[in-house]
Image (cartoon, rainbow, N blue to C red):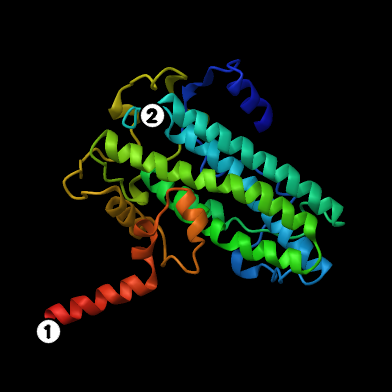
Amino acid sequence: MTRHYARLWRQGLLSTVTEQLIKPPDKPARDTQAVKMVSPRDMPRLGKAGNLSSRQALVHSLVHTESWAVDLAWDALARFGADPAYDLPAAFFDDFIQIADDEAKHFQLLQARLQELGSSYGALPAHDGLWESAARTAHSLPARLAVEHCVHEGRGLDVLPQTIQRFRSSGDGETAALLGNVILQEEVQHCAAGVRWLKWLFASRPPLRPLPASSAPASPQNGQHQAASLRKPAAVEAHEPAALSAHATDEIGSEFTTVEAWFHHLVREHFHGHLKPPFNKEARTAAGFTEDWYLPLTAAAAAAAAADAVRTLN
């Protein structure tokens, strides 16, 4: 379905994403009978692709990740696309529909490869850690871009080369080629979209401090929605901010002088823990996600800052 509607959008045959601005559900509908969901701590170890069962488990995990990635792209459009406080241009919709299409393609390719390896999606358990992370940024487009489309996409760029090498070393050149020649290349562009739209938000107006997640509006019940047209003009039509804005409107443009500093703030507010090396510097740089964005968020940078603070006090 995603690939069908993405084609219609690119061909200009679909000019309306939705006639109504609705509050999307907290979690997309899933066939709970198809895949057994467990907590991340209860997931069996995936292994290092040294045998067939490990390769099946790794590909199954990737298939599941791509299924959530499709939902994340559509959720960004449905949740934030018509919010007049952002006033997003048509290019935002182009980018995120393309991301949804890419992720759907990745899902199909990996699912087919999993079947070639003698397994199928749903044969193994999976977890919802990626969506649980997304739920914590449901109140703020800047936070969503920073955490999901920069931090998590960036982490994917970091770990894929090692995964590719493991498949190659085990003699599975087909999976290695799929990951290296198709998926890794397109994931660079997805990370680039996160960086690009954070820059756009920062440059287009003073950044807005998002509400804490606990202050985000509750999901409407029983199909209630707020009406708003969401078409594909040069920019999304303006509507009443009081009714539709999903975040606070207090400006913090004077607080952060660079987009990188704003990004650091968003990640520290909405992401648990530090960013972990080793980093795929080449792929991150190709995405515009340079070291000044992510190195200050490592444990080493935090320790150095703490040491500097102690020296200052002494």
Would you identify the image quadrant in which residue 40 lies?
A: bottom right
How many residues crowd mark 2 within 10 Å: few (<14), some (14–19), many (20+)? many
- The image shows residue 66 at horizontal and vertical percentages of 64, 48
Instruction: Locate the N terminus by quadrant.
Output: top right
User: Residue sitting at 47 percent across and 19 percent down?
Assistant: 232
> For the residue carrying disc 1, how many other residues have a C-alpha within 10 Å: few (<14), some (14-19), or many (20+)?
few
Q: Residue at x 69, y 40 (%)?
A: 105
Q: Which residue is mark 2?
A: 88
Q: Is residue 277 left or right of residue 266?
A: right
Q: Amino acid at mark 2?
A: Leu
Q: Is residue 132 above or below residue 249?
A: below
User: In which quadrant of the rendered view does residue 88 lie?
Assistant: top left
Check the image and report above or below for 240 versus 39.
above
- Which of 63/50 is in front? 50
Please count the marks in the image. Answer: 2
Quadrant of the image containing the C terminus? bottom left
Which residue is identified by label 1? 314
* Dot 1 amino acid type: Asn
Q: Considering only order in the chain, which callout, 2 or 1, is on the residue closer to the N terminus?
A: 2
**Residue at 42% across / 63% down in the picture?**
272
Secondary structure under badge 2? loop
Question: Mark 1 near mark 2, Cβ–Cβ under 8 Å?
Answer: no
Q: Residue at x 60, y 69 (%)?
A: 41
Instruction: Give 231 or 102, whichever is nearer the viewer.
Output: 102
Where residue 78 sits in the image (x, y, percent)?
Answer: 49, 32
Query: Can residue 211 be seen in the rendering of this structure?
Result: yes
Left or right? Give the position of 120 relative to 7: right
Mark 1 and mark 2: Cα distance apart in space = 48 Å
